[in-house]
Amino acid sequence: MPQNVVEGLKVTGQAGFITRKIWREFFGSGDFHASRKQIQRLQHRGYLIPHPNPIAPGVLVLSERAKNFFSANFGEHSPIPTAGQLIHDSFVLWSVLSLSRERLIAQFQFECEIRKGSQDTNIFRSRSRNVKIPDAVFEIRIGSALRKIAFEFERQRKSPQRYRDILWLYDGQEDFFLVIFVCETDAILQSIKRQVKRIGYQDLSNRVALVRANEWSRDPIRAPLNIANEVFLLDEICKKMP
């Protein structure tokens, strides 16, 4: 089996799904038509099947045969997301793969993978039993060291109290070098920014990066990250992986 196909099946098992568009962009062979035939062959050979919900066209998941392949080579596969999660999860998946393709990140995990491990250090719990799991966690290289990053896609606006709860949980996670909040609307970005200011901890302010989703979608590594009232680019912050 070609390496790009193995990698595609691996990511599908990690995320619980993949879209045809994402497969073509990151794992396809040749042009659009060649990639489409590649997907058709994988379906014909019984590795990929449509998402079980018919309202999710263009979304593929692992078949039982592919699940067995994944388990034998990579461990436990992730559950299939519901149709309602797919817009959010597709954006997270595309973001992580985009950064990985640029060799800016390593050792990534999606929320569904983290959730499987009840003792995972990336599951945060407060004294009031609030639980937070990042949408994704990955590592970037700063100088000669690897630093852990949390990634959050904020598609729908939460209450100010919920944002404060999330930020308090991140404030206690000092092993995270940065928390990137990609915000669907400017209202969401400003709401998180206000809660960071309200908490008032400089260390937290220095570790929260806010960016608009439309700017991130154009080019994640050069999207303006707003950190403590300054603007940085991801490719200025970190070095490419070897």
Image (cartoon, helix red, strand yellow):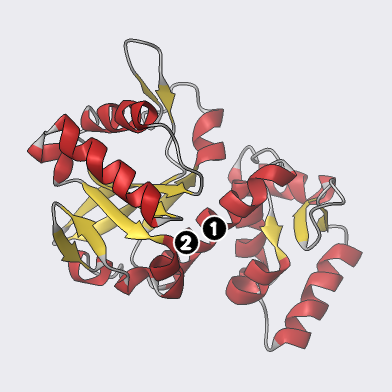
Disc count in the image?
2
Cα distance between the residues tagged 2 and 1: 6 Å
Can residue 7 be spotted in the picture?
A: yes
Q: Residue at x 35, y 32 (%)?
A: 160
Q: Residue 159 location in percent, x, y? A: 41, 31
Mark 1, secondary structure of its residue: helix
Instruction: Locate residue 10 relative to residue 206 in the image: left or right.
Output: right
- Of residue 124 and residue 183, the one placed in the foreground of this image is 183
Contact between marks 2 and 1 (CB within 8 A): the answer is yes
Q: Is residue 64 left or right of residue 98?
A: right
Q: Looking at the image, which residue sits at the far front?
A: 187
Image quarter (top left, top right, bottom left or bottom right) of the N terminus: bottom right
Residue at the location (72% across, 85% down)? 32
Dot 1 amino acid type: Phe
Where is residue 169? Give x, y as percent.
30, 27
- Residue 46 marker: none
Residue drawn at x 61%, y 40% as measured from the top left? 75
Amino acid type of the residue tagged 2 in the rendering = Ser
Q: Residues within 10 Å of mark 1 (few under 14, many from 20)?
A: some
Where is mark 2, residue-wise? 95
Mark 2: few/some/many CA within 10 Å (<14, 14-19, 20+): many
x then y, percent, for residue 164: 30, 29
Residue at the farthest right position: 44
Looking at the image, residue 173 sits to the left or right of residue 25; the answer is left
> Is the C terminus in the top left, top right, bottom left or bottom right quadrant?
bottom left
* Of the pair 160 and 80, the residue shown nearer to us: 160
- Considering only vertical position in the picture, is 65 above or below 202? below
The answer, for residue 72, to whether it is visible in the render is no
Q: Residue furthest left?
A: 202
Which residue is denoted by mark 1 in the rendering?
A: 91
Mark 2 element type: helix
